[in-house]
Image (cartoon, helix red, strand yellow):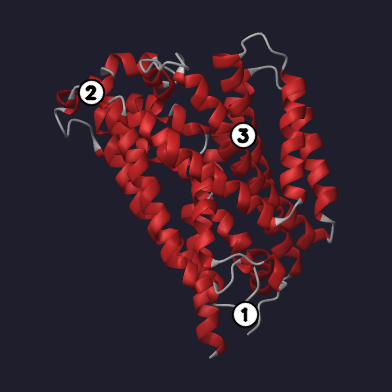
Amino acid sequence: MKNAVDEKYLISPFLIVPLMYVSMVGVGVLNFQHEMAELAGYNAYISVVLVGISIHLILWMIYKILSSNQEGVDVTAINITCFGKIVGNILNFAIVLYFFFAAYIEFYAYIEVIQIWVFPSIKILPISAILVSFIYYTVSGGFRSVTGLSFFGLLMTLIFIIPENLSVLPYTHPLNLMPLFNHSITDILLSSKSMLFQFLGFEALLLFYPFIKSPAKSQKWAHLMVLFVTLMYLMIIIITFMYFSEGQLREISWPTLNMLKIIEGPVFQRVEYLAISLWLLKNLSGISLRLWCACRGMKTIFQIKPRASLLTFLVGFLILEYFLKDHSIFLWISECYSDVGLYFIYGYIPIMFVVTQVRKKWRR
């Protein structure tokens, strides 16, 4: 069956690689080791492996859900088909809010990094307005524009970010990882929940699936990217554990950036500034992808033009940025988003998998 999306808006199956990457890797890669070390110590690397394996299973379910219906539909249409217009659109609006807050958390977290590490005395509103302008330009250009920016975000990571982390290896102490198993299963599971927060975003596939040409061919690339991101997180957390003592790690809020401080060059003596600057492309692409998903959902539910809903969301960013002076409120929002993401990934998606498979067999 012909895809419902116009041919000129489609992307090649291979281009799911940068989209999956920017959706699963965000600002959290700069500090995720801190919380995980508090929960499971140096055994936290086990959580990375467990979550990575579970994401492969959930990704397989997502492809089954989307391929069980006619080609060219996303999860919003499937919700309406399975649960009716009223309940389906309630679920769809919840998904829109989910992606909006996912984008906002990434937006706020990056500005926080800029304010703490680069310009401590800068006013937040002007830099927020500049970033919002870039995001509007990207998302208003359409899905292919978001994909293009995501490609450059992935490229910057491969060229700069990973080599910068590997350059710390001569200063590490492998014996820090011993003993290998000295935490309970409960600690590992709590650490896994924290790790899941870093992977949240890959579920954007539920909405951009119809924009992939021959989407079934993209599945192998999607799984390959989940494996790559899992290995990257595993590499970063093991290097961090070998570089810092467990006591140091519990006191350091941004372990990845602190490691980069040891590197000096003839031009840049503060390499972490370069890393933060290069991270802008990757972070903007992740925010843009999430906002594109939110706008896509609004178009399905309320027939609102994407640019109108995009402007509304971006104004919402600025309003939240202006009024959220207390950092504890942002932490509360992040915690709520993490909890909702847990239920969304391990609750909603498996339920939808069962519903769509039963419905498919019933039709036969």
Report which residue position mark 3 lands on.
105
Q: Residue at x 40, y 17 (%)?
A: 265
Secondary element type, mark 1: loop
Which disc number belongs to residue 70? 1
Q: Give the Cα distance between marks 3 and 1.
A: 34 Å
Looking at the picture, tell me which residue is in the foreground, 6 or 194: 6
Looking at the picture, tell me which residue is in the foreground, 347 or 164: 164
Q: Is residue 320 visible?
A: no
Q: Tell me: 33 left or right of 132.
A: left
Height in image: 178 above or below 88?
A: above
- Neighbourhood count class around disc 1 (C-alpha, 10 Å): few under 14, some 14–19, many 20 upward: few
Secondary element type, mark 3: helix
Q: Do the residues labelled 1 and 2 touch (CB within 8 Å)?
A: no
Which disc number belongs to residue 170? 2
Secondary element type, mark 2: helix
Q: Which of marks 2 and 3 is nearer the N terminus?
A: 3
Which disc number belongs to residue 250? none
User: In the rendered image, which quarter is residue 337 located in?
Assistant: top right
Q: Which amino acid does label 1 sit on?
A: Gln
Q: Earlier in the sequence, mark 1 or mark 2?
A: 1
Q: Give the Cα distance between marks 1 and 2.
A: 54 Å
